Image: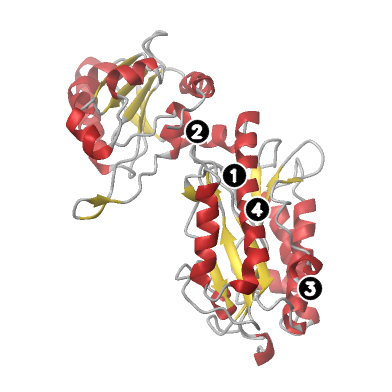
Amino acid sequence: MFEPDHKVFEERREIFLNKLDGKAAIIPGANLVKHHADCEYPFRQDSNFWYLTGFDEPDAIALFLSHKPKGERFIMFVSPKDVISEVWHGFRWGLEGAEKEFKADKAHSITELRDLLPGYINGSDELVFSIGKYPLFEKIVLEIFSQQLENRSRSGIGANSIKSPEIYLNEMRLIKSEFEINRMREAIQISAEAHELVRASISSKKNERQIQGLLEGFFLEKGARGPAYNSIVASGDNACILHYTSNNSPLKKEDLLLVDAGCSLIDYYNGDITRTIPIGGKFSSEQKVIYEIVLSAQKNAIKSAVKGSNSSAVHNVALTILIEGLKEIGLLSGSTEEIIENQSYKHLYMHRTGHWLGLDVHDVGAYRMGDYEVPLQNGMILTVEPGIYISDRIPVPEGQPPIDEKWKGIGIRIEDDVLVTDTNPDVLSIAALKEISDLEF
């Protein structure tokens, strides 16, 4: 059984409670979701709940009561110990475990939530709760909040508004601590080693599904929880489908194989890496030209991911190089500025160049607020993943050249995980090779 470092969670709770400044926060954990009949999907804890508690059981709620004195601020509602349930479904910490092991000031059965919650949040003028995520808990919370509003109209006491916890937690989670960076390094290293295993094994594999099995088996062998997201193993034209997950086509020696996959650790920190390799061991001349454009865009975008820059600047570096390269080979025409302004490149490159990475693969945190671009800071981890996808799925924009058949079916993306530092960007996924000389055999 994985046991988290509880000191880490205690420190986070203290920061969160200070940010709440007199408010009462209600943070639900995730519920089990039925797959069919008596079978559930694998449980995945809510990231905010995990970030603050380290508690990995379903159907739990944590209260953070900054309006209360110390020793009464962290309350948990959990499933109580139950011998029969534990025989069927496994160990539970129960109320005593929530207090002793997870350092709750007080723990109650989740069945008592409706009765006890009003007393805990009473005295706070504002609730902090995320609407729209967990309807079963939300129904209870909103009923109690409505009663608080009614009480306030008579007595002037009680909560009068609800604010999202993401206002506080997104900012906290965006900047990774040294502990988190080390966990991310481990997740990304395992992910990179899995990609290297694919590269070394490609000549003996016949189907995309075999590659998926190789990746995900390696994740489990290394002690990870499993894949961080649905692995994308896309050969040939399938690579032009951005979120292709069927992974059931035969591998052809003349095609490229795009693999977008990463592992999730037991404590939910994730890797996210993409590599595109020649199945037969050699790039064709057309494949090589496109790969070189994407690789140049990616390398230069990584160099620009420095403290004080921003995600849009990183994207624009990659986008400009992609467009210039596509113009050189006749797949785009016109001035680069006009192509960007008219978005007339989007039949070939239709996504942003990266996203935050952490407890969620597409991790929380703003990229911009209105016209304000959030600057890159020490401790942020982002992906850098430009690509080119050449197919007939999106019509060629008016004024752009038709696509010669020789280019069709080429889909290439190269993705690394990058830590922003005081000096140069730290490419955490560097162990997954990407130079043409390393990929050909």
Q: Disc 4 versus disc 2: distance between alpha carbons?
A: 29 Å
Mark 2 belongs to which amino acid? Leu
The secondary structure type at the circle numbered 1 is helix
Which numbered tag is attached to residue 192?
4
- The quarter in which the N terminus is drawn is top left
Q: Residues within 10 Å of mark 3 (few under 14, many from 20)?
A: some
Rendering coords of residue 36 (x, y %): 22, 57
Image height of 153 relative to 189, above or below: above
Q: Quadrant of residue 435?
A: bottom right
Indicate whether 102 appears above or below 85: above
Quadrant location of the C terminus?
bottom right
Disc on the earlier residue, 3 or 4 = 4
Nearer to us of marks 2 and 1 is 1
**Closest to the observer, 96 or 137:** 96
Percent from the top left, x then y, of residue 436? Answer: 78, 69
CA separation in Å, label 1 and label 4: 9 Å
Q: Which residue is mark 2?
A: 169
Task: Mark 4: give few (<14), some (14-19) or many (20+) Cα within 10 Å.
Answer: many
Q: Amino acid at mark 4?
A: Ala
Q: Amino acid at mark 1?
A: Ala
Lower position in the chain sequence, tag 4 or tag 2: 2
User: Where residue 333 appears, x then y in whole percent?
Assistant: 74, 82
Residue type (three-letter) at the residue carrying disc 3 = Glu
Q: Residue at x 50, y 55 (%)?
A: 217
Name the residue carrying label 3. 324
Furthest residue toward front: 204
Q: Which residue is mark 1?
A: 187
| Mark 2 vs 3, N-terminal side | 2
Badge 2 marks a residue whose secondary structure is helix
